[in-house]
Image (cartoon, coloured by chain):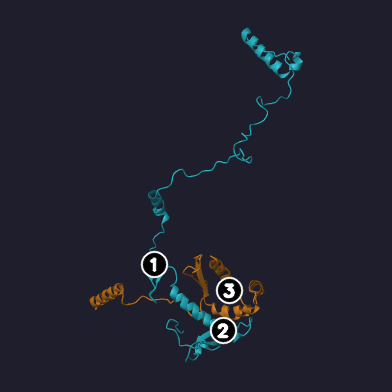
């Protein structure tokens, strides 16, 4: 393959021709005529064929060369450093400024949350009322189609509670349950 | 969060029920959502008339202290307004004995005296 290079300098042309010739000899040795021996697949390893497995007299033969490196602390963290980390303000619980006194019972409560004691009272009373309802209804699917009214001991239904079903509770009315 | 989600469903169901007993769509909705069939009767006959005068919110959503178990989960309580059960929160009116109210009362008396 002749490369036609029209360069003005003859020296440059000679250099290019020599480079091209060397390239050709490298790529197609057979074409050139057998001055360099044909290449073939050769062993990449020049030294001893076997990788050294370790001297046989060190320990049990189950020692593997594959070691996994893991991170471990180099020094013990002193108690001062530990204290600095544990008591750093971003690790402490934030102070809450939304605690108030419940006006009914005097327990503490959060401003946007109901008082725990008052809620427990109401929950218990509701549970007892619902037990009465359950006893009155009898079965599971007997919800009445009228409103309900809860009356305590010694109370009579007023004119407003005309068509409602009455649930009796055998105790006196608690002060916090106002009758409408 | 679950109570909040449920509140939307409950209010929409009541809005459907307000349309009336004979409305076909309302009846189908109530039938689909309420699995206990006697509650559909209660919805249409008791809750719909009860909430007829009110325009919007029929439920009250309140937060209660965190659960006592290991998880300290946030808890909330939902109730329909106007129910016969004991009230969860008593609406408190400002007492007349607070300092601010006493001062305002004194100011009002002064103004009246000056006018008269």
Identify the mark at residue A133; answer none if there is no mark: 2
The quarter of the image holding the C terminus of chain B is bottom left
Q: Secondary structure at mark 1?
A: strand
- Relative to A20, is A42 above or below? below
Q: Is residue A13 left or right of residue A125?
A: right
Q: Which colour represents chain B?
A: orange
Residue B25 position, x and y percent, is: 66, 72
**Same subunit under labels 2 and 1?**
yes
Q: In the rendered image, which quarter is residue A12 located in?
A: top right
Q: In the rendered image, which quarter is residue A174 located in?
A: bottom left
Q: Secondary structure at mark 2?
A: helix
Query: Which residue corresponds to the image point at 39% horizontal and 54% vertical from the top-left?
Result: A89
Give the chain coloured cyan: A
Residue under numbered circle 3: B14
Closer to the chain start, of discs 2 and 1, is 1
Q: Is residue B87 visible?
A: no
């Amino acid at each position: 393959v002749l490369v036609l290079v029209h360069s003005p300098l003859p020296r440059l042309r000679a250099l290019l021709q020599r480079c091209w010739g060397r390239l050709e000899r490298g790529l197609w040795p057979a074409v050139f005529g057998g001055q360099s021996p044909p290449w073939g697949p050769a062993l990449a390893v020049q030294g001893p064929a076997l990788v050294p497995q370790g001297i046989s007299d060190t320990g049990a033969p189950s020692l593997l060369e594959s070691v996994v490196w893991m991170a471990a602390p180099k020094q013990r963290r002193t108690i001062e450093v530990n204290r600095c980390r544990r008591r750093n303000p971003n690790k402490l619980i934030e102070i809450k400024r939304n605690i108030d006194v419940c006006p009914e019972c005097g327990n503490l409560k959060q401003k946007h949350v109901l008082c725990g004691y008052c809620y427990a009272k109401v929950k218990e009373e509701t549970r007892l009322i619902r037990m009465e309802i359950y006893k009155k209804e009898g079965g599971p699917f007997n919800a009445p189609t009228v409103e309900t009214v809860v009356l305590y001991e010694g109370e009579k239904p007023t004119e407003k509670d005309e068509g409602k079903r009455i649930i009796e509770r055998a105790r006196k009315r608690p002060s916090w349950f106002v009758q409408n | 969060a679950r109570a909040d989600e449920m509140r939307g469903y409950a209010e929409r169901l009541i809005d459907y029920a307000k349309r009336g007993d004979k409305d076909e769509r309302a009846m189908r909705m109530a039938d689909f959502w309420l699995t206990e069939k006697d509650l559909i009767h209660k919805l249409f006959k008791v809750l719909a008339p009860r909430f007829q005068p009110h325009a919007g919110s029929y439920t009250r959503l309140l937060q209660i202290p965190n659960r006592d178990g290991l998880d300290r989960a946030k808890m909330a309580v939902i109730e329909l307004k106007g129910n016969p059960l004991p009230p969860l929160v008593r609406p408190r009116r400002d007492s007349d004995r607070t300092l601010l109210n006493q001062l305002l009362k004194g100011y009002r008396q002064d103004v009246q005296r000056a006018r008269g």
